[in-house]
Each structure stands twice: as structure tokens, then as C-alpha cells.
Image: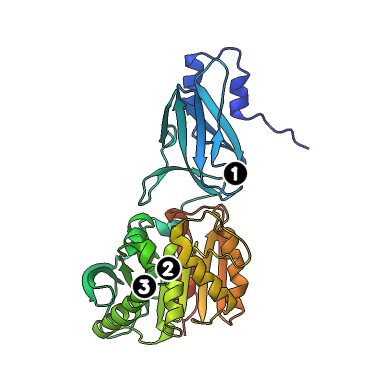
Amino acid sequence: MARREKLAINRLRESKVLDQQELESFVEKHDFPIMEGTQATFVAWQQADQVFLRHRVVGIPDQLPLRRIEGTDLWYVVLEIPRDSRVEYQLEVRRGDHWERFNDPLNPRTARSPVGDSSVCYGLGYEVPDWARHDPEARPGELVELMIRSQAQRRDNRVTLYLPARFRTTRRYPLLVVHDGGDFLEYASMKTVLDNLIHRLDMAETVVAFTYPGDRLREYPNSGPHARWITKELLGQLEEQFPLIAHPSGRALMGSSFGAIASLTTAVRYPQTYGSLLLQSGSFVFTDIGDLRGEDPAFAPVVKFMNRYRTKPLRMVDRMFQSCGVYEPLIVFNRSMVPVFTETGMTVNYVESRDGHSWESWRDRLRDGLCWIFPGESLYVYE
């Protein structure tokens, strides 16, 4: 059996002289976190009383302490990061009574989200998908801004409509309605993904309606006005103004987290209106087989809906793509719902990833979901 080489941080600790020059050389020599096989060494060079690694990997303490190398201001912790993993994190330091949390200054890779950036660790084998990067060969689709009046919600709603590059009024297109559409465009590179997948013929030419919520925590969990807005007003107006396939087989709803709940509850309220659902990291929280004491009050209507649905499951679409990251607490709920959905007769394609509850995680599953919901000619002809 081959002898395992010592980790870089342990070789540094055993150095005879640990002066400023030695530390600077160590930092300059390595990319951080240091990946050695599946061992990830997170390093902080900070004058502090305590340093912690903050993350959202289920099963590991959220506030993970780093150890200081004696006689230095270099702190470290080693974690096992399985192949193909992607982990977002920050550092937290305590100096006396002062606490500060920030991205890793030694790591240039960051992930963006509506609540701010975070550092990101790529495990061995992980790469940003090539279809999520700009391809100069791909003809770009067009984004059209609309304002559509919702009587159900008593307001004007913004909608960004994606028209594929070769859009023609002489043919008909499937329609995908995306909850939190602005965030999918901004943080999950979804226009780039659509351009690339359609260009490669992996995905059918599709019209995509990116929607924007008001108060999503109130509107998304089983809201009658929201479901009416999406189905009776948005869908009706788009099918009247654009050449769309006015049939369930050509309609799909999509969302992540609470957006997945909004998609699911809308489909339940209007069964057989849509042919497909694309649900990512759905907030499918239920208590019929457990107790979630202290849960956020925003989840109360979700829990009520999920408990009721699990008691009497409904087949509201023909096909469902469902994905979740194994590092997020919602993984248990998502796994539990697969047999519930399947037993209704819906065809369910369930995918897991070594990632968390994040926009880049949802981006990385877009090809799996979009090309299964509306496959292009390179895969097979959609019926």
C-alpha cells in the first residue's frame, strides 16, 4: 500500500523555522483552499483570538473552529471534501468582543447570490459546466421586457421574456415559466445556458417567461392569487400574443427553494394545465412524520400544504424533474417526496449533487432539467 504524503499544512507545521518569510512563501506557493486528493485545507492568515469556518454543509457544525499554528497568525482546518463537490463558505474571526465575517482573502473564487457573495471551494473533479459559460458560437436569444397587469394580485408585474435566436411567428413554441426569474438570470447564468443548450440542439427552442415576485415568502406558499396570476393571467396573455403550444405538453413551471413550492402549489391548484414541473431544492417541509419545533413561521403554510398533499397525493402533471444538493438540510424532505410523487403516476427524474442550497448549484443542474423537460433534436424528438 502506497504511503500517503503529508499534507502541506503539516509539512509547514514541522518546519524548523516558521518566520514571516516562510509563511509568505507558503501562501504564495499554494492555491486556497489547498486540495490534496479529497482533503481540503482551509487557511486564514489573521491576527485574531478565534477563527471559524462558516458554511452550510449539513452534518458538519456550521461554526467550525480553525487551529492556530503555534507562534504564528496562521490558522487552519482540514475537511474531507468528496469528489465533484462544491462548497460555499466564509471566515469568521473574533478579536476581543468584536466579531467579523468575510470571504476568504486567499481564495479568489466567489459565488454570487441575492444576499451577497461567498467564497467557494471546488472539490477534486468539479468544474463549471462548459454549457454555463459564454459560447461565442451560440446565437443569442432576445430578452423582451413586459409589464402585465394582474387583477388577482392587484398590481403590474414585470416579466422578462426570452425568445430563442431563431424565433419565428410561423411556428409554435413550448413555454417555460420561471419563478424568481430575475435571480435565475443574474445568479444562475440562465440566458447563457439557454443560448448554449438551444444552439447545441440539446434543448428545444423554447420561450421562457422569467417572473418577479413581490413578497415571495407570502406569495409563493400555496397562494391562490399567485396561482391565478400565473395560470389565468400570465399564461393566458402570453398564449394570446405569442405563437405558443396551447397544450399541457408545451407548458412547464420551474422554481427553486420557495419557487419550487410556488410551482408545485400552482400546478396542484390547476391540475393538467401544465405538462411538466422543474423543481430544484424544493422547500418541501412537512411534519406528518416528524416535528420541526422552532421552524421559521414563513414555513407554516408550506407545512400545512405538504402535510395535506402527502395525505392525498395528486397527479397534476405528467413529468417532474426534481433535484437537490446532498449538503443542504432539505435533502431529507426531497428524497422523501420522490416516492410520493412517483406513486401518483407522474414520471419523476430525480437528481442529487454534491452541493448546497445555492444559485450555482441550481445552475449546474439546469441542463439535466431543461433538456429532460423540453429535449432538443440531439437527444430525441419531444412529443
- Residue 167: x, y in percent? 28, 76
- Residue 278: x, y in percent? 46, 70
Tell me what residue is drawn at x 70 percent, y 33 percent.
Answer: 4
Q: Considering the numbered disc 1 on the image, is that residue within a helix, a strand or a loop? A: loop
* Quadrant in the rendering for residue 110: top left
Q: Is residue 47 above or below residue 142?
A: above
Q: Is residue 167 above or below residue 362?
A: below
- Res. 177 mark: 3
- Res. 188 mark: none
Q: Nearer the viewer, residue 17 or 114?
A: 114
Q: Considering the numbered disc 3 on the image, is that residue within a helix, a strand or a loop? A: strand
Q: Nearer the viewer, residue 165 or 75?
A: 75
Tell me what residue is drawn at x 59 percent, y 28 percent.
Answer: 8
Give the amino acid type for the residue marked by disc 3 in the picture.
Val
Task: Looking at the image, tell me whether mark 1 or mark 2 is earlier in sequence order.
Answer: 1
Q: Is residue 140 left or right of residue 248?
A: left
Q: Which residue is mark 2?
A: 221
Give the amino acid type for the residue marked by disc 2 in the picture.
Pro
Q: Is residue 2 left or right of residue 203?
A: right
Q: Which residue is mark 1?
A: 60
Residue 378 seen in the figure? no
Q: Nearer the viewer, mark 1 or mark 2?
A: 2
Tell me what residue is drawn at x 51 percent, y 33 percent.
Answer: 52
- Residue 211: x, y in percent? 31, 68
Tell me what residue is drawn at x 24 percent, y 77 percent.
Answer: 151
- Neighbor class of circle 1 (other Cα within 10 Å; few <14, some 14-19, many 20+) is few
